[in-house]
Amino acid sequence: MRYLITGVAGTGKSTLAKELRQRGYAAYDTEEGFSYYIDKRTGKRCAYPKNPTPQWYENHERVFDEKILLNLMKRHANEPLFIASITANQAKYYPQFDKIFLLTAPDDTITYRLGTRTNNYFGRHPLDLQRVIGRHQQFDDELKALGAVVIDSTRPIKQVAGEIINETRKDS
C-alpha cells in the first residue's frame, strides 16, 4: 500500500516521516534529497535564493524527482510506503496512492513551527510565510475534496503517527 502524507509547510510532515521510520516503516520525506526547485519555463533545476521575490516564485516551483519516487514505489511494492511531500507535481501522482493523509494545524501553530524549526529554514522569510499561510485554507480544501484523511497535527507526533498507522490497518 502507498500513502501520501501532505500538508502545507509547518504541519509536521518531516517529523512524521522520521517517526514512522523509527517505527520500522518505509517512510520518505521529499525534502530529504529528492525535491528541488525548477524554472517553470525550462524545467531546469535551480537554487533557492536567500531572498526570494514574488517574481521569482512566479517563475519557479518545488517538485520531487519523479524517477526517485517511482523507484521507491517499486522497491517497496510489498510493504507499506509513506511519502511525505508538498510539491507542485504531487497531484499528478495522487491516483498512485491508496490513501492521502492531510496534516492540518492552525495558522498560528504553523507560523510558530516555521519560525522555530531547525531542520529546514523555509518559512522564515516573510514572503515564504505569507505564501504558506495565504494558500493554507485553499490547499486543505482541495485535498479534503479529494477525500484525504484529515489528521490534526497539533498533537504529539507519536499520537499523530499512531492515528495514521491505525488508518492504514483499515486497508489490510
Image (spheres, grey):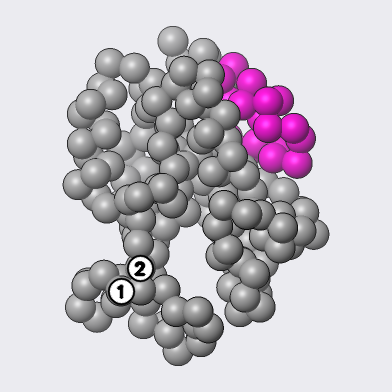
> Which residues lie in the magenta part?
149-166
Question: Which element is circle 1 on?
Answer: strand
| Disc number for residue 60 | none
For the view shown, which residue lies furthest in the right direction? 108
| Residue found 67% across the figure and 60% down from its top | 114
Q: Amino acid at mark 2?
A: Tyr
* Quadrant in which the C terminus is drawn: top left
Q: Are marks 1 and 2 in contact (CB under 8 Å)?
A: yes
Q: Earlier in the sequence, mark 1 or mark 2?
A: 2
Q: Residue at x 52, y 14 (%)?
A: 170
Image vertical order of residue 72 relative to residue 123, above or below: above
Name the residue that disc number 2 marks: 37
Q: Residue at x 57, y 35 (%)?
A: 16
Does 154 lie within the magenta span? yes
In the rendered structure, does residue 66 fall within the stretch colored magenta? no
**Foreground residue, 36 or 89?**
36
Residue 46 image label: 1
Q: Residues within 10 Å of mark 1 (few under 14, many from 20)?
A: few
Residue with the most extreme front position = 118
Relative to 160, residue 31 above or below:
below
- Image-based side of 36 in relation to 135, left or right: left
Task: Pinpoint residue 1: horizontal percent, then vertical percent.
Answer: 36, 22
